[in-house]
Image (spheres, rainbow, N blue to C red):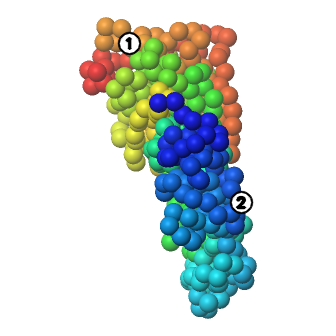
Amino acid sequence: MDQLFDGASCTESYQCPNSHVCVNSVCTEVGSVKNGTIIKFTDLPFSNYACDHFAYSAIGNETFTCIAPVTLAGQAAECTTNSDCAASNNNAGTCTCGLSGDSFCLLQIGDPLYDKPNNYLKDWLKGNAKKCNTARRLSRPCQRDYWENYDEYQYYRYQASVYPWFKNAKDEFVKIFQYEYYELEHTGWANETLKDAKLQWQVLTDRVTFNLTVDSGVVSNYDWYGVALKESSDKLSMIDGDYVVVMLKNHSVFHMNTFGYGSNGRPQNDTAPVFIRNSSHVLGNGNLLVSWTRELGIRIPNQTLELKSGANYTLLYAFGKVEKGLLEKHEKNNRGYGSILLSSDFSGKGKIPDDDSALSTFSLLALLLLQVAF
């Protein structure tokens, strides 16, 4: 059915645009109702998103007031009892012990740290949420597929919800008791733009995670995509490379190498397993997302590189088709290279070489590989 427009009469939020919900029987933009306004909800958990801070207080049958209470003593104020954490709407707050050893008030929805995740969510609902249906716009799977800032939103939302745990705490305690939060706080995602794909990586204390996102057009029209890392000091060629090859039709992931080669040749399918984990799935827009994680500082002689945080590497990439059970050689413009830094704040763009000889043989992988892959 067609979605209604802004200001149209409604009975359910799913009838309205993805950027709107149904309150007072009218399609109303998310976040547009000021705090203190009395409104009538038609369906939770959607109608409350009309409120500026998405928060409400019931005052009658299906009648609510939009609210944004703050902590009277200040955001995450030091406390000894719950009474020290009273909110501006006269509700009691919660005093909780943090990793610093001191106690602080849990935040109220109107405290400043909640502004960032709330603004992220407003931007999502007014933007790319239109790629989901109105029932799924708040679902995590849909948000992960289409929301570029999903991880940032979850990070800031979690930070605001349990901020007293982290306030004034030493890094070593946060690292031990809230390791995932610690890593997210101290690291980001680096990226290299490839032809019809993007490679991202996140460097943590003891490991690195790579995300390869292949455009839907390549997934539909080709059969394999490969990336490789080489020591930056080596000559530009396929020799002594550490390869990951993804089969685009069944999403198999192969770890391969060309160590010990005297000239360009097909990578071998004999690299010892070094992935801590790997996964792949098709996103809602048809792109293929493939992830793999490796430990830092680990090297298998003649099979893998030793990946080091802060080190420079040469990146190779290519993609192509399969013909009669063998991987065909890539087309000239469907391969390239770049120089990357294994840090979490790098950004670059791969190049297509003028000379085809250096990267001429990302081709004809062993038949054994294809018997496994297809």
For the point 35% across and 30% down, the residue is: 252
Which tag is nearer the camera, tag 2 or tag 1? 2
Nearer to us in this view, 156 or 17: 17
Nearer to us in this view, 321 or 296: 321
Question: Which residue was labeled with disc 2?
Answer: 34
For the point 64% across and 58% down, the residue is: 51
What is the quadrant of residue 282 in the picture? top left
For the point 54% across and 38% down, the residue is: 146
**Residue 371's x, y, as percent?**
26, 20
Badge 2 density bin: few <14, some 14–19, many ≥20, Cα 10 Å: some
**Residue 163's x, y, as percent?**
61, 71
The disc, 2 or 1, on the residue closer to the chain's N-terminal end is: 2
Nearer to us in this view, 214 or 245: 214
Q: Is residue 240 left or right of residue 338?
A: left
**Residue 21's x, y, as percent?**
57, 48
Q: Is residue 317 left or right of residue 300?
A: right
Mark seen at residue 227: none
What is the quadrant of residue 373 in the picture? top left
